[in-house]
Amino acid sequence: MSTPDRPAKRVTVVHPRTAAARTAAKRGVRRDVREQTELGVTMLTSLRRTQLRLAVLVVLGVAVVVIGIPLVFLAFPAVREGRVGGLAVGWFILGVAVFPAICGAGWAYVRHAERNEAAFVDLVERS
Amino acid sequence: MTSSWWPVVAVVAVVVATVVIGTFGVRVSRTTSDFLVASRSVSPFLNASAIGGEYLSAASFLGIAGLVLTYGVDMLWFPVGYTVGYLVLLVLVAAPLRRSGAYTLPDFAEMRLGSRRLRRVSSVLVVLIGWLYLLPQLQGAGITLHALTGAPQWVGAFVVAVVVGVTVAAGGMRSITVVQAFQYWLKLVAIALPAVLLVAAWYHRGAPVFASGDWGTPLSGFGGREYPLYATYSIVLATFLGTMGLPHVLVRFYTNPDGRAARRTTLSVLGLLSVFYLFPPIFGALGRVYTPELAGTSAADTVVLVLPGRVFGGWLGEALSALVAAGAFAAFLSTASGLSVSVAGVLSQDVLTHDRRLGDGVRRFRIATTIAIAVPFVLALGAARADLAETVTLAFAVAASTFCPLLVLGIWWPRLTVRGATAALLVGGSSALAAVVLVLTLGPFHGFVGALLEQPAAWTVPLAFGTAVLVSLRTHDRVPRTTPAAMVRLHTPEELEASR
């Protein structure tokens, strides 16, 4: 999470801390993003990378669990025959338990993705 | 076979309601601006219900139970995959895709890479995937009507094809979000209520356990499935990555007002699908107890329809049979009309444009609709009968091998070139489609080569991604000049756009 901080520091150094200058700068950076100047594109690239890192993290987490479940079944035959609360283990995991996990992962993702965007918007507005 | 006429009445009621709402209901126009106008008044939850209503097809409503009945616990990967597909879509695609402003997959291809040729290749693939997905919907209608009345298989397919053709050509169904949302709740009630009552009855009768052998054991290859581990991973890959590339899924995203809403809608979809998918496997499991003779036959997909009548006698059995029959037809009609609209839209916009004799926009759209539904109907008459959920998964495999690389690399990788994307669509699409055509005409196959053909995603998806990356890197001097602008558009939060 170091990337979003870096442009913040750079921007604060560049602009003088007077109210008039700040208003002018606010318009400026907004326009930078919108009109895709070098600064605007660089800032958005950092947001894109942050979001990509988050997405890859979620996808990798799902992948590890999903690739892992059949491997555990394969490696430990005893697990396959096990039971959880009257249900066979395979049924419990694939028929019931995965679904709350999927929703939880989705919920956490949305929270973090919106937070990243809010931080970015904040950064642009402040500078 | 049920001798009662209740389920037939329920099916007729669903069909008539669909035609009436579609033809004479709210006058709906097909222009994209109307979608935007509608979207502002549609909450993410209502929109999510509509997406769920369109997404839960014959494969979900009938197919999963049939597969679980025949092949056991490994088949639970299908519903898991259909749900996780939306999680992957949420994480990798949802918000940027909405921000791209694309209404169809060819729109996205052109917006991102600015190539008419790539757009045309995408259009052809949308049509082929749409037809492949329509095929099991029509087959499902055929076996449902056959199970209810003994009518020949083609009758049910014909009914759905005509109803969908008429309503779509009349301009209905599509943007009536409320109708699609209602279809979700109808399907949920139609599967959940009988399932809960069936479990209660089963428990009340002393919870008879069935001699299942390896049926409940993962990776046992029960029911004669070879290479269960390979098949599991391939199903997982196809469903996880294929969902985002389905033509009717993408169109629905346009109804969200912005990228943030697209994310929240998708999150609600995850919840709605998770609730629905708790129930179909119950029919498969109790089918093992009460209707074991269906397992492994071509009638396995009818277990959801047959089971309530078998377990409950009298009016309760008949009422529940009517309910599941209505739910099944709601599934065929909603999914088939969503797909037909997408296929017809692409046909009329991108394929039939050269022929002036086809007349103005509306007339061309109607001709396109006829083609969109007639081709899968003919295919449904001729294709080898595979399990519904298996056929649907073939469509997922083709989508995962084509549009998944286009979307994921297009959104996150600025170095994608037109040639890289086109090569990926051609290589991934032709290899996956070749496997699908072989399976549907000459299948089923056996041995390891058979497993590779029956579940192609595990090798066609990496092939497509590899092609896209390698060709793009080899043509790195041809990255479109519009790429930085497109990337900014895809990833800029709305707050910065709105306050210009």
Image (cartoon, grey):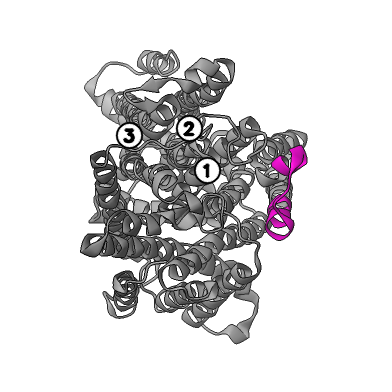
Query: Residue B243: x, y in percent?
Result: 50, 45
- Give the quadrant of residue A77: top right
Residue type highlighted by circle 3 = Arg
The quadrant the N terminus of chain A occupies is: top left
Circle 3 SS class: helix
Residue B284 spot, x, y in % from top left: 43, 45
Is B458 placed above or below B310 here? above
**Which residue is more in the foreground, B170 or B225?**
B225
**Which label sits on residue B388?**
none
Residue B250 visible to the viewer: no
Residue under label 1, please give it.
B486
Q: Within 10 Å of the Cα at label 2, are there few (<14), some (14-19), or many (20+) other Cα atoms? A: many
Residue drawn 44% across and 70% down?
A: B145
Q: Which residue corresponds to mark 2?
A: B216
| Marks 3/2: CA–CA distance | 64 Å
Q: Is residue B324 left or right of B213 when viewed as pictured?
A: left
Percent from the top left, x then y, of residue B500?
Answer: 32, 44
Would you say residue B348 is visible in this rendering?
yes
Q: Which residue is painted at 67% across and 37% down in the image?
A: B226
Q: Nearer the viewer, mark 3 or mark 2?
A: 2
Q: Which residues are magenta?
A: B433-451
Closer to the camera, B207 or B151? B207
Which amino acid is tagged 2?
A: Gly
Circle 2/circle 1 CB separation < 8 Å = no
Same subunit, tags 2 and 1? yes
Magenta-span inclusion, residue A119: no
Vertical comparison of B390 with B92: above or below: below
> Is B414 left or right of B453, judged from the image as shown?
left
Which subunit holds the residue at mark 3?
A: A
Q: How many marks?
A: 3
Q: Which residue is mark 3?
A: A27
Viewer-nearest of discs 1 and 3: 1
